[in-house]
Amino acid sequence: MVEDNKNAGDSPLSISLGKEIDAAVGDVLRALLIKPAQETGSLLGDSIGLLGDKIRRKRAANLQIGLEKVRVTLDAKGVDMKDITPPKAEELHLLTNGLSLSDDENIRSIWVGLFAQSLDPESGTTAERPFINILESFSPMDAKIFDFLAFASKTDKELSAQASRFTPKDLLNITSEESAKVKASHYENSTRRAAAIAAINQKADEYDLRTISDPHWARNLMRQGLIKKFLAQRPLLRRLGS
């Protein structure tokens, strides 16, 4: 990942990037993703220029925490530095700026995910400005709700993909063996459904979403087009009688 460079004038530590990119972007990425043992903090200060007053020091700390999480995420996926797909210079600036402003852990995790995905050559995700504009508008509550909805959607898709499906050959003449398989399939699906519901409820409790005190909690998410309001439909007979 890190290799010695003996050429005169070159940095003693360099990271081999897999694609031809702008030299300045490459220098920043090398500084950002180098491991903490190689003095990430000083490199961040030199490359991004965030050190200074109290606010800048806080932003530098946020950035360092976030970038370490990006590196850990890439390591967990087995993404080597030589294989990363560097973002455009503007996108890199927006991503690092967003991480530096992220005090909230839930917001930070979304920035980290977007950053890591944009560097992963297998993801196909880019840090496009519309994504970043939405994320920049997130409050901590927005981030919790967004993550909860994503978790619930993922859990539902996994439940559907793992569902046991067994159909007897002849529905009018079901054998005892087929009947047993149908019951087993229903039991398995019921168990998985209960586990999925429990996981979703646990996530709601973790984020304290059972009772949200802010009556306008959905306003920003609706404005961004991430959620929509659906009016509850009253039963037909009640509508006719009203």
Image (spheres, grey):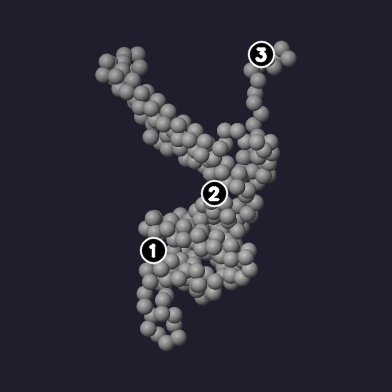
> Could you tell me the amino acid type at mark 2?
Asn
Residue 151 picture location, percent across and down: 49, 41
> Could you tell me the amino acid type at mark 3?
Leu
For marks 1 and 3, the one nearer the N-term is: 1
Compared to 179, does 82 lie above or below?
below
Image quadrant in which you'd find residue 232: top right
For marks 2 and 3, the one nearer the N-term is: 2
Measured in 3D between alpha carbons, the distance from the residue under mark 2 to the one under mark 3, in whole angstroms, is 45 Å
Quadrant (top left, top right, bottom left, bottom right) of the N terminus: bottom left
Of badges 2 and 3, the one in the foreground is: 2
The residue tagged 2 is 106
Measured in 3D between alpha carbons, the distance from the residue under mark 1 to the one under mark 3, in whole angstroms, is 63 Å
State the residue in front, 8 or 58: 58
State the residue in front, 191 or 59: 59
The residue tagged 1 is 80
The residue located at (38%, 34%) in the rendering is 162
Task: Identify the element where label 1 is drawn.
Answer: loop
7 vs 228, left or right, is left
State the residue in front, 171 or 184: 184
Of badges 1 and 3, the one in the foreground is: 1
Residue 21 visible in the shown view: no
The residue tagged 3 is 237
The residue located at (61%, 45%) in the rendering is 142
Residue 155, numbered label: none
Q: Dots 1 and 3: beta carbons under 8 Å? A: no
Measured in 3D between alpha carbons, the distance from the residue under mark 1 to the one under mark 2, in whole angstroms, is 26 Å
